[in-house]
């Protein structure tokens, strides 16, 4: 078994990105004087959901990809999955603030989820075969 160094590097990037999303939520809470929940503020609700969506998907994806890397999967496969996941996670919050049913919402929010779920699906299937 090999230490998943590439996944570890990306996990650190994801941790920093999560801290950024957390700071973004905290700033929204402070500016809206909201201690709990979203206070009925739709922008704060979008920030909270962007952060929550990140934490709902990234840990599972990183675990699956790290297992693949530890099992000896090719560097290109690991790098491709991690880049897809990273791009997907960056796109998603951008799409959350796009106008409803706009091309930007479709491309960023939808594209972000397709990349995220695609990375999870590919990693899971590769672990099974």
Image (cartoon, grey):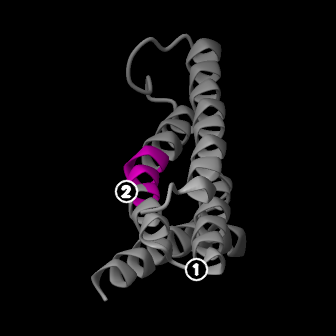
Q: CA distance from mark 1 to mark 2?
A: 20 Å
Asked if residue 58 is positioned above or below residue 117 in the image, the reply reads above
Asked if residue 129 is positioned above or below residue 70 in the image, the reply reads below
Within the image, what quadrant is residue 29 found in? Answer: top right
Quarter of the image for the N terminus: give it. bottom left
Asked if residue 112 is positioned above or below residue 127 in the image, the reply reads above
Residue ID at (49%, 14%) = 34
Was residue 6 drawn as part of the magenta stretch in this picture?
no
Q: Which residue is mark 1?
A: 74
Q: Is 116 displayed left or right of 21 in the figure?
A: left
Q: Is 111 displayed left or right of 39 in the figure?
A: right
**Camera sees residue 96:** no
User: How many residues crowd mark 2 within 10 Å: few (<14), some (14–19), many (20+)?
Assistant: few
Prevailing secondary structure class for the magenta stretch in the rendered image: helix
N-term-proximal mark, 1 vs 2: 2
Q: Is 28 displayed left or right of 60 in the figure?
A: right
Q: Secondary structure at mark 1?
A: loop
Residue 92, numbered circle: none
Residue at the front extreme? Answer: 1
Quarter of the image for the C terminus: give it. bottom left
Residue ID at (51%, 77%) = 73
Residue ID at (48%, 36%) = 48
Q: Which residues are magenta?
A: 54-62
Q: Which residue is mark 2?
A: 60
Measured from the top left, where is residue 105 in percent x and y? 64, 67
Residue ID at (58%, 79%) = 74
Residue at the bottom extreme? Answer: 129
Of circles 1 and 2, the one toward us is 1
Q: 33 or 24: which is nearer to us?
A: 24
Measured from the top left, where is residue 64 in percent x and y? 39, 64
């Amino acid at each position: 078994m090999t230490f998943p160094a590439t996944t570890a590097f990306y996990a650190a990037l994801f941790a920093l990105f999560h801290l950024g999303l957390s700071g973004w939520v905290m700033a929204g809470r402070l500016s809206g004087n909201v201690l709990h929940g979203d206070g009925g503020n739709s922008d704060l609700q979008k920030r909270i959901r962007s952060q929550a969506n990140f934490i709902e998907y990234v840990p599972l994806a990183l675990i699956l990809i790290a297992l693949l890397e530890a099992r000896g999967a090719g560097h290109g496969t690991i790098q491709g999955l991690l880049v897809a996941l990273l791009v997907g996670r960056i796109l998603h919050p951008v799409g959350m603030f796009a106008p409803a049913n706009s091309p930007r919402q479709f491309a960023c929010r939808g594209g972000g989820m397709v990349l995220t779920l695609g990375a999870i699906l590919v990693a899971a299937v590769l672990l099974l075969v």
